[in-house]
Image: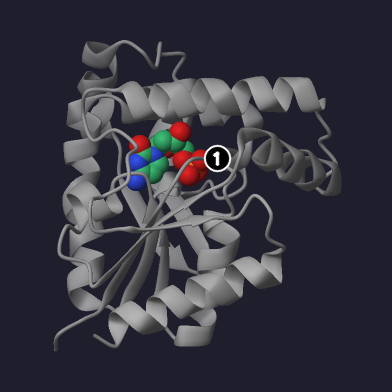
Amino acid sequence: MKTISIAIDGPSGAGKSTLARSLSAKLGYLYVDTGALYRTIGYYVFTKGIDPKNEAAVQAVLPDIQVEMTYGEDGLQHMLLNGQDVTKEIRLPEISMYASAVSAHPPVRAFLLEMQRELARKNNVLMDGRDIGTVVLPDAQVKVFLTAAPEARAQRRVLELEQRGTPEPFEKVLADIQKRDWDDSHRPTAPLKQAEDATLLDTTELTFAESEAALLKIIEEKAGQ
Ligand code: DC
């Protein structure tokens, strides 16, 4: 069976996961949140007290890590770390920086690459991340680079954190987003960047419904070709 792959890349907080989850349900595609994979490694490194920037130290523990992805009855992607469900833990704000730091190491990226490709070989996927269109699935039929101004992304994140009961000030959230943007797009291996053949979608001025409609239009146009 020839599968269809939709790659959605972009910086944190651009709305990738919310939009991708909603659209994959509508299209009947498997939604793969690849950031959760890096978060799972970041979480392991955090629990072991390892400096996430120390590539040799992180590489040394990779053989001890088993990462699995399952889809719960809720239809949501759950992450298993050595058999333990860490879906909630990997969303803690401090894990974002750990995920970003470990994701810069080539051995970590190599460790997770095949798993992502295998999912796309077996399923129609809507995969979101930073390097899906450029590295993981360069032959994806649809590639979208989803972005928004840092202030708009920070504002959305502030609301999300408030709703989750873990509020944080706007200035801190904005500074974290700017640091992560810089780190993710300036690392030498698989940096965050728009693939040449990706369609740019800037959601700064768009509501969720408008962003979803715009994304669906791009997908329909490209997948229909
Ligand atoms: O999408 P997210 O915020 O959950 O991702 C967490 C970190 O993982 C992000 O800062 C960069 C990294 N990441 C990556 O390097 N490549 C991906 N395909 C997805 C995420």
Q: Is residue 47 above or below residue 128?
A: above
Whether residue 81 is visible: no
Residue 35 at x, y percent in the picture: 43, 45
Q: Name the residue carrying label 1.
A: 90
Q: Quadrant of residue 28?
A: bottom left
Residue 2 at x, y percent in the picture: 14, 85
Quarter of the figure with the N terminus: bottom left
| Colour scheme of the picture | one colour
Residue depicted at 16% across the width and 38% down the height: 110
Does 95 sit left or right of 169 as displayed? left
Residue depicted at 43% across the width and 28% down the height: 100
Residue depicted at 25% across the width and 57% down the height: 116
Helix, strand or loop under label 1: helix
Residue depicted at 18% across the width and 29% down the height: 107
Residue 167 at x, y percent in the picture: 84, 34
Q: What is the three-letter code of the residue carrying label 1?
A: Ile
| Depth check, front residue: 26 or 197 | 197
Does 225 sit left or right of 158 as displayed? left
